[in-house]
Image: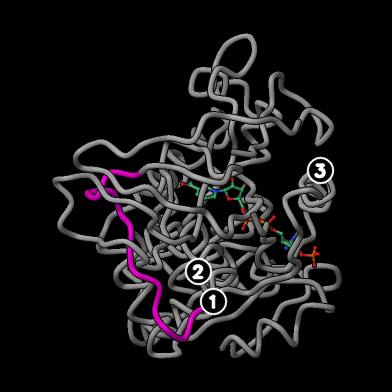
Amino acid sequence: MKAVVYRKYGGPEVLEFTELPKPQPKENEILVKIIATTVTTADLRMRKADPFMVKFLMGFPNPKKQVLGTEFSGIVEAVGSGVTRFKVNDRVYGPVGFKPGTYLEYRCFSQDSPLSLIPENVSFEEAAAIPFGGMSSLYFLKKGNVGKGTRLLIYGASGCLGTAAIQLAVNMGADVTAVCSGKNEELVKSLGAKAVIDYTKDSLKFYPGVFDVVYDTIGKSPFDESIKALKKGGIYLRAVHMSPGVIFRGIRAGLTSGRKVIGGTASELPEYIDHLSELAAGGKYKAVIDKIYPLSEIREAHKYVDSGHKRGNVVIKI
Ligand SMILES: NC(=O)c1ccc[n+]([C@@H]2O[C@H](COP(=O)([O-])OP(=O)(O)OC[C@H]3O[C@@H](n4cnc5c(N)ncnc54)[C@H](OP(=O)(O)O)[C@@H]3O)[C@@H](O)[C@H]2O)c1
């Protein structure tokens, strides 16, 4: 089967086309013919080994796990003898957690992994783009106790996690203010944001004590201004919260400002994918797709995502 591998860390040019043996499902596994996958910021982090500790997951000094791809959609082609949850020809999608590898034609998954049937009204391209942004933002919004009436500021609202977060928060009954550039104002409003702050012209310092929760999806919100934009008792959620300096500032802010800072790694729980499927089936959640590339143009797709300016998701058709 065809696959894309990377044998060293680096830019999009490290991605190479190759042939790998087609896997066979074990007793508890399904074999999925992958129809679509995506290029996520996690793929970029693994490709570049950014931060350095990525090497402890992917291999040292060069990647040992050589196939990228963090989410997929596809068709069940075969099932192991013990599989009861899925059958041949089911349309399925899901995340891959800490076992990346969807830039290929076939992959086996345990029937117990957080997979879901694709709702009838959702295409393979849309389904592939749901898990990474949807599950990550669902995790953080739950950590922030976002619910009816929460005044929520989403920073990086036009990205993958941001476009997911707007829709999820609106479904939770929150009042969403989106931070993005002017060119994305229409997009974030169409997803349900009530107000927009243009980060190229405006500043959070003009919004002191306004929000119950600030959710920074891209790690670019100014730390002190974000804390001050919160009401007393407010929560600052940070999807990118890795450097020791920022973690220290978070602990200090928690002890001195009366606001809480929450980072960490999102869990990919089965109930999250089920919730996203339910919302998508009911027309209440739709992955935003910026561009769709064929697998043959995977390097171009990575280069585009490297720009840091994609809107929502970039999909790859296998
Ligand atoms: N903690 C976890 O478990 C977890 C889980 C998933 C992801 N993450 C992390 O989350 C991060 C974000 O991922 P993503 O996939 O959502 O990013 P993304 O889709 O690549 O974000 C791109 C968007 O960010 C906007 N943007 C760029 N600079 C901005 C700024 N200064 N202010 C406001 N918006 C700005 C861009 O809009 P413009 O073009 O208008 O600038 C663009 O639409 C990644 O670093 C990833 O590693 C963490």
Foreground residue among 243 and 250: 243
> Which residue matches tag 1?
123
- Most distant residue in the top direction: 61
Say which residue appears at 76% left-offset and 59% top-offset: 293
Say which residue appears at 30% left-offset and 54% top-offset: 114
The amino acid beneath tag 3 is Arg
Q: Position of residue 57 (x, y in %)?
A: 48, 23
- The quadrant of the rendering that contains the C terminus is bottom right
Chief SS of the magenta region: loop
**Mark 2 Cα shell of 10 Å, populated few (<14), some (14-19), many (≥20):** many
With 260 as the anchor, is 71 left or right in this view? right
Q: Position of residue 260 (x, y in %)?
A: 39, 53
Q: Which element type, helix, strand or loop, lies under badge 2? A: helix
- Give yes or no for contact between labels 1 and 2 (Cβ–Cβ under 8 Å): yes
> Which residue matches tag 2?
127
Ligand 1: quadrant of the figure: bottom right
The amino acid beneath tag 2 is Ala
Q: Quadrant of residue 109?
A: top left
The amino acid beneath tag 1 is Ser
**Mark 1 Cα shell of 10 Å, populated few (<14), some (14-19), many (≥20):** few
| Magenta-highlighted residues | 109-122
- Distance, label 2 to label 3, CA atoms, is 22 Å
> Which residue matches tag 3?
299
